[in-house]
Amino acid sequence: MTDVHSSAIRSYNMKQIKNKNTKPEMIIRKYLFSHGFRYRLHVKSLPGNPDIVLPKFRTVIFVNGCFWHGHNCKWFVVPKTRTDFWITKINQNKKRDKKAIKMLRADKWNIIVVFECQLRQVIQNRTLNRLIRSLSQIISSTGS
């Protein structure tokens, strides 16, 4: 099967995809800030370069795109062209995620992973409330 776009258009489209300050990430950041949480962004010194870091609570939040991280949801569809390339790339991403999480856990960090599908309209409020509950449990267990 061939791509519906020329290679130049496909290349342009792929370059437009952001890896920082994405809409799902901004939703979580605004929600955290409005609830009094202060954080750091994209801390390169931590494994996996977490999207959001709450140093006070030793907690990191990864905001993952369903496609790029191979999430098992309706939003993840393997492309029909260059299928082997994409499966390999996505599996490498998942492997890198697992390694980063393992290293963070070994260093006693709390880890929260949120996928973009969890922030879609209908379930957004439930996901954000679950995030605050998770953070509340972490805060109560650390005594901060």
Image: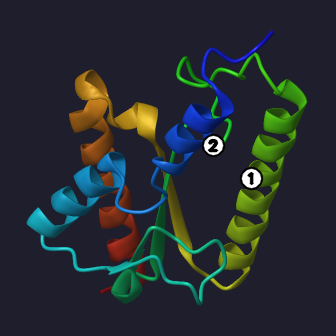
Quadrant in which the C terminus is drawn: bottom left
Q: In this view, does 116 lie to the left or right of 132?
A: right
Q: Is residue 45 left or right of residue 125?
A: right
**Pointer 2 residue:** 68
Q: In this view, does 47 lie above or below 118?
A: below
- Callout 2, which amino acid? Trp
- Give the farthest residue toward the left: 34
Q: Are marks 1 and 2 in contact (CB under 8 Å)?
A: yes
Quarter location, residue 66: top right
- Callout 1, which amino acid? Asn
Give the spatial CA distance, label 1 vs label 2: 7 Å
Q: How many marks?
A: 2
Query: In the depicted view, which residue is nearer to us: 102 or 49?
Result: 49
Write the residue at 48% across / 47% down. Answer: 17
Q: In this view, does 83 lie to the left or right of 12?
A: right
Q: Is mark 2 on a helix, strand or loop?
A: loop
**Pointer 1 residue:** 93
